[in-house]
Amino acid sequence: MDSQTKHAGAAPDFKRRTVITAIAAALGVATIGLQGPLGNLAFAADAAGGLASFVRLSEFSTHRKLDPILAERYYTALKKRNAQLDTEVAAALVQIDIAKPADIDAFLAVIDPVTKATVTGIVTAWYMGFVGSGKDVELISYAEALMYEPARGILVVPSYGGGPNSWGEKPV
């Protein structure tokens, strides 16, 4: 008895194999452009979602549960200024998963300069409440900037003025 009469009425297996092979080939082609030892891992982490990855890295870096609405605003502003943000965030998360650092200080001590610049840029945005500098500055949140967190409930966040850096020139 041949395989066609043995499985009469059943869908042939070759279609499933063809689909699986096509998916594997598509994933292989999609990862060709990524370079370096973490390239394929970064692609996999990035595929999970830019904003979700950004929130995960932000919460690890600040050691706080962060406002999702503000997270989306920071993410959008940072991505506007850095087209590679998703890839850099994904690479940072892969490094966190591999190194398993105890905290942000331990992580910053062992990462490469590009990842360090990305992470410190994200932390700076959350603490200062703005993204960019000079004429390119974009205020995201003045009162909810993390720099006010230690004094929240003790001191009132000043509500007068134009936001951070509105008091005078940046010190040299």
Image (cartoon, grey):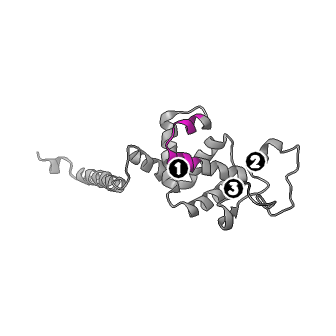
Seen from the viewer's position, the closer of residues 71 and 102 is: 102
- The residue identified by callout 2 is 147
Report crowding for label 3: few under 14, some 14 to 19, many 20 or more residues within 10 A (C-alpha): some
* Amino acid on which the number 3 mark rests in the picture: Leu
Asked if residue 68 shows in the view, the reply is no
**Residue occupying image coordinates x 61% and y 51%:** 121
- The residue identified by callout 3 is 70
**Residue occupying image coordinates x 36% and y 53%:** 31
Q: Is residue 117 left or right of residue 138?
A: left
* Amino acid on which the number 2 mark rests in the picture: Met
Task: Specify the farthest residue to the bottom.
Answer: 135
**Residue occupying image coordinates x 31% and y 51%:** 24
Element type at mark 3: helix
- The residue identified by callout 1 is 89
Q: Which residues are magenta?
A: 106-119
Report crowding for label 1: few under 14, some 14 to 19, many 20 or more residues within 10 A (C-alpha): many
Asked if residue 102 shows in the view, the reply is yes
* Amino acid on which the number 1 mark rests in the picture: Val
